[in-house]
Amino acid sequence: MQAPDFAALGLPRQLVRALDREGITTPFEIQRATLPDALAGRDVLGRGQTGSGKTLAFGLPVLARMAAGPKARPNHPRALILVPTRELAMQVNDALMPLGRAVGVFLKTAVGGVPYDRQIDSLRRGVEIIVATPGRLGDLIERGVCRLDDIQVTVLDEADQMADMGFLPDVTELLAKTPANAQRLLFSATLDGDVDTLVKRFMTDPVTHSTAPPTAAVSTMDHHMLLIPPHDKFAVAASIAARQGRTMMFARTQMGVDRLVAQLAEVGVRAGALHGGKTQRVRTRTLAEFKEGRTSVLVATDVAARGIHVDGVSLVVHVDPPKDPKDYLHRAGRTARAGESGAVATLVLPKQRRSTLAVLQKAGVEPAQTRVRSGDPALAEVTGARQPSGVPVVDEPPAPRRGGDRRQGDRPYGERRYGDRPQGERRFGDRPQGERRYGDRPQGDRPQGERHYSDRPQGERRYGDRPHGERRYGDRPQGERHYSDRPQGDRPQGERHYSDRPQGERRFGDQGRDDRRPDERRAPRERWSDERRRPTPTR
């Protein structure tokens, strides 16, 4: 029996034609399962193997509903797609933007690490769909440039990862700002207890579609556990990185990622680093270089493991074994996507063997265990490893970026930008060499006798000039006495001065303690504390 096409699932004709232009003609299993209910306006819970087509499963119903409705008001998007990471937001936007353009629906990403200006301008012009991370969307709402009153459809993509990353309070707060009767679509590789909290509070009679078990046990993916001696770990990782084909390697920490990339460059392997400590511009460029094949190795933390889709990744390497089964599943899901084949290798030291086996068993994986060293034929057979060149990698200047990301000097030779002009081109304020303008005359370059500003004949008086000896206010001849100039003792005998008074002379306030008339004297006043000290008379 032939599988139904997009038109048979109820998708509008405009979107079907747009999909045809993109070369997408046959829906995936998750799309066939969820599209009819989502197009009918029902709340949908979708669980599918990573790389199974969840983006179009929720994106197509959202586009269809937005295309059938009115244009968005300024600062009031009509659909919200929440994702956990910036890379996933951009990936969703890139996948849906060509389809949205075909039906007149505008999309905009709202993610951290980039300036607010463009996001605010787009919201003010009006966008139907906003693809956002929880943190940046909350900031835009606080600034008063985004309101969720008009939201008709809300999508949570990779909901389990948002819960794992601690976004659950932010997501709950954002969903509470949307209308209670809005349609809600939740898609994830796993549906666990944390996600169930959101489902019970915000979804109404949801229909659940699960197209794959929450394990990585798929027939197109091979799992290997490589048991290596501790001193040989980097040599094994470097030989795997030097293989032919596109490879993703995962380390546990940002520092570990940067260290491994630097060490690989020293032995002749060019690799890109992707983690949350990089700026968004660097992360976007690194991912683009990996997708376009300019680098064949991408070293990342788990920030890149969730939802990032890169075609043709044939091997995933866990340089540091994951601590959680979910992390293993999402890392491994970067290969064998959408029916492709791939392999997953985990480098395990002797002391890590027991704990790693327990994690893989919880993930539903039974790996093939192999003891290897650098240069072993078994290592080359499993991973395609080969010896690195040993010639250190010299950093090349970055390729020109699109939009406003290009830095000063980072452009092809000869490209003209604002402020550039051909040699010799004259602009306002330019003048030929030697042309004289007001105030340009060199000192002494004037006819004899011509007077210039600030020139004056000798002896001419100006404001502030005075002849020698002329008296002005405050001047007095030497020896003239002034008020308060008299030195102490410089007065005739017997002359009284201010503040002088004969000994014994009394002034106001000088009266002594007993120097009062008898009728003015009073007995000392008793204090309250004295009264308390009096003995109580006995009866």
Image (spheres, helix red, strand yellow):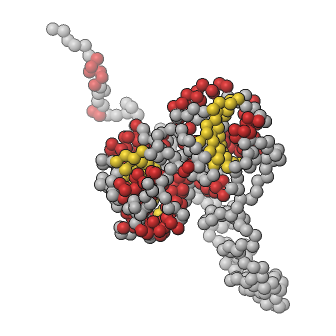
> Residue at horizontal 33%, vertical 57%?
41
Q: Where in the figure is residue 376, as x and y percent of width and height?
A: 77, 34
Foreground residue among 49 and 320: 49
Q: Where in the figure is residue 101, as x and y percent of width and height?
A: 48, 69
Q: Is residue 17 left or right of residue 519?
A: right
Q: Where in the figure is residue 43, as x and y percent of width and height?
A: 34, 51
Is 466 above or below relative to 166?
below
Is residue 252 in view? no
Q: Where in the figure is residue 34, as x and y percent of width and height?
A: 40, 52
Foreground residue among 196 and 400: 196
> Residue at horizontal 68%, vertical 64%?
400
Furthest-left residue in this view: 539
Is 336 above or below relative to 524?
below
Furthest-top residue in this view: 539
Q: Is residue 297 left or right of residue 403?
A: right
Is residue 473 in view? yes
Furthest-front residue in this view: 1
Foreground residue among 129 and 120: 129
Where the N terminus falls, by quadrant?
Answer: bottom left
Foreground residue among 302 and 330: 330
Q: Is residue 328 left or right of residue 166?
A: right
> Residue at horizontal 26%, vertical 16%?
534
Is 452 above or below relative to 326?
below
What number of labels is visible? 0
> Residue at horizontal 37%, vertical 44%?
198
